[in-house]
Amino acid sequence: MENASKALIIAGAILLAILLISLGIMIFNQAQDTVTNSGMTEAELTSFNNKFLKYEGNQKGTMVKSMMQEVKSSDANASDEHKITVNFQKDENSSLSATKTTKDIDTKHTYYVVMGYEDSGRINTINIYYNKAKADETTKKP
């Protein structure tokens, strides 16, 4: 009788161990799925940013208009809620303001484009300055 009792205790312990291991595996898999779905892979992030990085720096108005079309396309195709905010400075005396249109962009003028990033490294803001001096003045750090 003692052996049967010990056998039942051992069997119960084995079943409990199997249950705990299964539960641990299930929790690990759920956590892994959450991490996988939480953001872009490094390659996706690089690919996304590269669409806009070619427009950084001094750009003619025609290139700025092309960039705006690229932003509109990206925002329309975004599977998540990520949208890029574009801020535009119409002339030397105006300040940056959010825009979605290209009507105020002079195709012959050279603008200065600066990218802004989220903590994840993804571009979330594009500032279009009337000229580089204005950009330097605006982004100066104390």
Image (cartoon, rainbow, N blue to C red):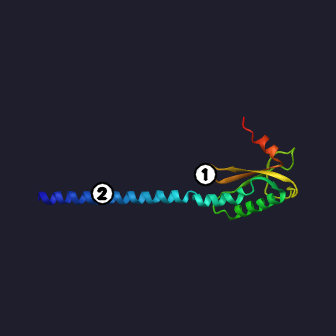
- Determine the CA span between mark 1 and mark 2: 39 Å
Name which residue lies at 74% across and 62% down: 70
- Residue 90 location, x and y as percent? 85, 50
Asked if 129 appears above or below 3 in the picture, the reply is above
| Mark seen at residue 17 | 2
Q: Given the image, on which type of amino acid does mark 1 rest? A: Ser
**Does residue 1 appear to the left or right of 30 in the view shown?**
left
- Residue 104 location, x and y as percent? 86, 55
Q: Given the image, on which type of amino acid does mark 2 rest? A: Ala
Which of the pair 21/129 is nearer the observer? 129
Number of numbered discs visible in the structure rendering: 2
Name which residue lies at 17% across and 57% down: 6
Instruction: Classify residue 40 by image quadrant.
Output: bottom right
| Mark seen at residue 87 | none
- Residue 134 location, x and y as percent? 81, 44
- Are circles 1 and 2 on residues that touch, CB within 8 Å? no
Between tags 1 and 2, which lies in front? 1
**Does residue 31 appear to the left or right of 118 in the view shown?**
left
Q: First in sequence: mark 1 or mark 2?
A: 2
Visible in this render: residue 40? no
Which of the pair 68/59 is nearer the observer? 59
Residue ID for mark 1 = 120
